[in-house]
Image (cartoon, rainbow, N blue to C red):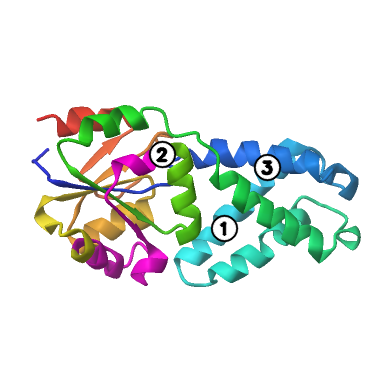
């Protein structure tokens, strides 16, 4: 791999362990609100249905089919319906309260992807480190502060701040402008083939696809890793 000066990391699923943190939060919420009495089978069902429906909503958000207000205002209604809850007993205040607490409590969870701090400790003195994320502005900063990831990064580029979402070229243009990075010396590291990898590639930026599930694909990538610590081997040249 060639030498780089500027590293741009995705946040959720790449450094911050969204699955683990969301699972813990959803289990807590299931019991706090006693969702069994509304017909949701158990905490695992609640978690699994949330993951499935939330992924579809974020895909629609990334492609511009919905906005963040629709996602926030409708997410748990959609989840409860899909979990076969008795919706006649579920009022709007309950859904609003669950969503509000999910956002606040999940963002304060501290779990990071295995090897994240090892990689960042290696990188911090050798590269300029920045984040590019489609996550909500106010939420991402809380995640980074509570997990301790914030100490490693100079600029946090969010889609809200940039006015563009990955994979749009606009967010990468914004990132270069506001970090002073040079495209030819920049590398994007992320877990999403569509937003992180294709977006960066189409913009002309090299990429590392973080693929812990070893999903098969046909995308052209600069490099691919299945463990975050493998990034050290790629960069230590």
Between 106 and 58, the residue placed more toward the observer is 106
Asked whether residue 41 is drawn in magenta, I would say no
Q: Where does the N terminus fall, quadrant-wise?
A: top left
Q: What is the quadrant of residue 228 in the picture? A: top left
Neighbor class of circle 3 (other Cα within 10 Å; few <14, some 14-19, many 20+) is many
C-beta proximity under 8 Å, tags 3 and 1 = no
Q: Position of residue 112 (x, y in %)?
A: 45, 34
In this rendering, would 236 be left or right of 45? left
Q: Which residue is mark 2?
A: 215
Between 200 and 3, the residue placed more toward the observer is 3
Asked whether residue 157 is drawn in magenta, I would say yes
Q: CA distance from mark 3 to mark 2?
A: 26 Å
Task: Say which of marks 2 and 1 sits in front.
Answer: 1
Q: Secondary structure at mark 3?
A: helix
Above or below, 64 against 199 in this view is below
Residue 26 circle label: 3
Q: CA distance from mark 3 to mark 1?
A: 18 Å
Q: Which residue is mark 1?
A: 56
Neighbor class of circle 1 (other Cα within 10 Å; few <14, some 14-19, many 20+) is few
Which residue range is magenta in the image?
Answer: 149-176
Neighbor class of circle 2 (other Cα within 10 Å; few <14, some 14-19, many 20+) is few
In this rendering, would 96 be left or right of 188? right
* Residue 65 seen in the figure: yes
Q: Earlier in the sequence, mark 3 or mark 2?
A: 3
In this rendering, would 7 be left or right of 131? left
Q: Earlier in the sequence, mark 2 or mark 1?
A: 1
């Amino acid at each position: 791999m060639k030498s780089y000066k500027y590293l741009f990391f995705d946040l959720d699923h790449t450094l911050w362990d969204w699955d683990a943190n969301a699972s813990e939060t959803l289990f807590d919420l299931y019991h706090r609100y006693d969702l069994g009495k509304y017909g949701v089978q158990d905490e695992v069902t609640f978690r699994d249905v949330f993951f499935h429906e939330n992924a579809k909503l974020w895909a629609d958000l990334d492609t511009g089919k919905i906005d963040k207000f629709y996602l926030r205002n409708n997410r748990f209604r959609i989840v409860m319906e899909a979990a076969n809850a008795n919706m006649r007993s579920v009022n709007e205040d309950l859904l609003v309260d669950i969503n509000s607490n999910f956002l606040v409590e999940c963002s304060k969870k501290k779990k990071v992807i295995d090897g994240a701090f090892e990689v960042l400790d290696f990188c911090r003195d050798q590269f300029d480190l920045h984040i590019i994320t489609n996550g909500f502005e106010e939420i991402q900063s809380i995640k980074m502060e509570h997990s301790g990831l914030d100490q490693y990064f100079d600029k946090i580029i969010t889609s809200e701040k940039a006015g563009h979402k990955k994979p749009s070229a606009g967010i990468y243009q914004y990132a270069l402008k506001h970090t002073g990075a040079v495209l030819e010396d920049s590398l994007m590291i992320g877990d999403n083939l569509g937003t992180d990898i294709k977006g960066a590639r189409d913009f002309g930026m090299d990429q590392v696809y973080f693929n812990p599930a070893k999903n098969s694909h046909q995308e052209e990538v600069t490099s691919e890793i299945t463990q975050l610590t493998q990034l050290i081997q790629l960069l230590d040249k």
